[in-house]
Image: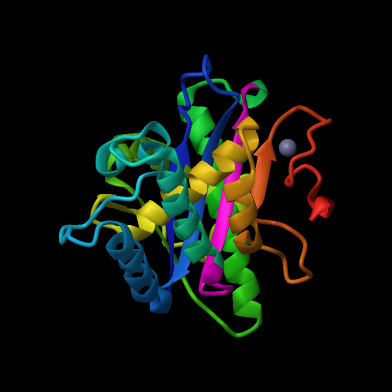
């Protein structure tokens, strides 16, 4: 079984301060989850040696100096973030596979459509990955887990979704997603960091975190990039999704 942890960056209804809404999914094989969580515990122990409770890794807190890192310097916050991204980078295919979808303002109508279109891309590409795994006799089903704080938004979206997308039926993805609290689910924190890396990359802030996770973005069996989709009408965009041969 693969579990796809989904998180988002940006606001699907507030376009005054952003050019993109981004969603990321991190598919982790069930056998790799505890090892990845243990490694995140090691990162916590390195920086909070005396804290026994679980420190929530939330990328926005690192950016805005809030929560557990509010007293930390910028350099230290960036160092911890890099440690987390390197942990993602070290967890190699097919234990961990990253998916991303970015939607530009020119494709946005309302919050429901923005979230639906990006979620559809993430789930379709996750389904593609499961099909390719099946063809090499690594047959698995996929389960989707979403942050509980967005439960209402996704429940209304899923009523219309029902595993049918513009790409067809998602036969390998279990049609009932689960909702979990991100402060108790280390893998949702990993998805949050991936979403933030895509966001920084697309907003043009910098690509240093995206470069660390881009080797983990899903590829087709021939090596071509499939796991990242940019929804835009801009034909001149030169992001990795619009010009995948850049990598
Ligand atoms: Zn693009």
Identify which residue is drawn at 64% across, 43% down.
207
Identify which residue is drawn at 56% across, 74% down.
94
In the displayed structure, 114 sits above or below 23; it is above
Is 44 within the magenta? Answer: no
Which residue is farthest bottom? 137
Is 93 within the magenta? Answer: yes
Observer-nearest residue: 6 or 175?
6
In the displayed structure, 230 sits above or below 169; it is above
- Asked whether residue 152 is in view, the answer is yes
Identify which residue is drawn at 32% across, 63% down.
46
In the displayed structure image, the side of residue 171 where residue 227 appears, left or right: right
Observer-nearest residue: 182 or 124?
182
Residue 132 x/y as whole percent: 65, 72
Marks counted in the figure total 0
Q: Quadrant of the N terminus?
A: bottom left
Observer-nearest residue: 162 or 64?
64
In the displayed structure image, the side of residue 140 where residue 165 appears, left or right: right
Residue 214 x/y as whole percent: 64, 56
In the displayed structure image, the side of residue 140 where residue 166 appears, left or right: right
Residue 159 x/y as whole percent: 39, 40
- Asked whether residue 169 is in view, the answer is no
Residue 225 x/y as whole percent: 73, 58
Ligand 1 shows up in which quadrant of the image? top right
Please report the bounds of the magenta region as a residue range. Answer: 90-105
């Amino acid at each position: 079984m693969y579990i796809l942890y989904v998180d988002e960056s940006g606001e699907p209804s507030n376009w005054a301060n952003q050019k993109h809404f981004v969603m990321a999914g991190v598919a982790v094989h069930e056998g790799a989850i505890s090892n990845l969580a243990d490694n995140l515990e090691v990162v916590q122990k390195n920086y909070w040696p005396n804290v026994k409770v679980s420190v929530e890794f939330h990328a926005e807190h690192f950016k805005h100096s809030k929560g557990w890192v509010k007293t930390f310097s910028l350099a230290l916050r960036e160092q911890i973030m890099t440690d987390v991204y390197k942990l993602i980078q070290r967890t190699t295919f097919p234990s961990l596979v990253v998916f991303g979808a970015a939607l530009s303002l020119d494709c946005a109508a309302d919050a429901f459509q923005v979230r639906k279109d990006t979620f559809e891309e993430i789930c379709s590409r996750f389904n593609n990955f499961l099909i390719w795994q099946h063809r090499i006799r690594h047959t698995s089903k996929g389960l989707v887990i979403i942050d509980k704080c967005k439960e209402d938004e996704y429940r209304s979206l899923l009523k219309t979704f029902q595993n049918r997308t513009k790409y067809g039926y998602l036969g390998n993805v279990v049609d009932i997603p689960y909702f979990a609290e991100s402060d108790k689910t280390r893998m949702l924190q990993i998805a949050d960091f991936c979403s933030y890396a895509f966001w920084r990359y697309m907003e043009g802030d910098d690509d240093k975190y995206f470069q660390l996770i881009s080797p983990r973005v899903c590829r087709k069996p021939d090596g071509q990039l499939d796991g990242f989709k940019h929804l835009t009408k801009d034909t001149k965009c030169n992001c990795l999704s619009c010009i995948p041969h850049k990598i």
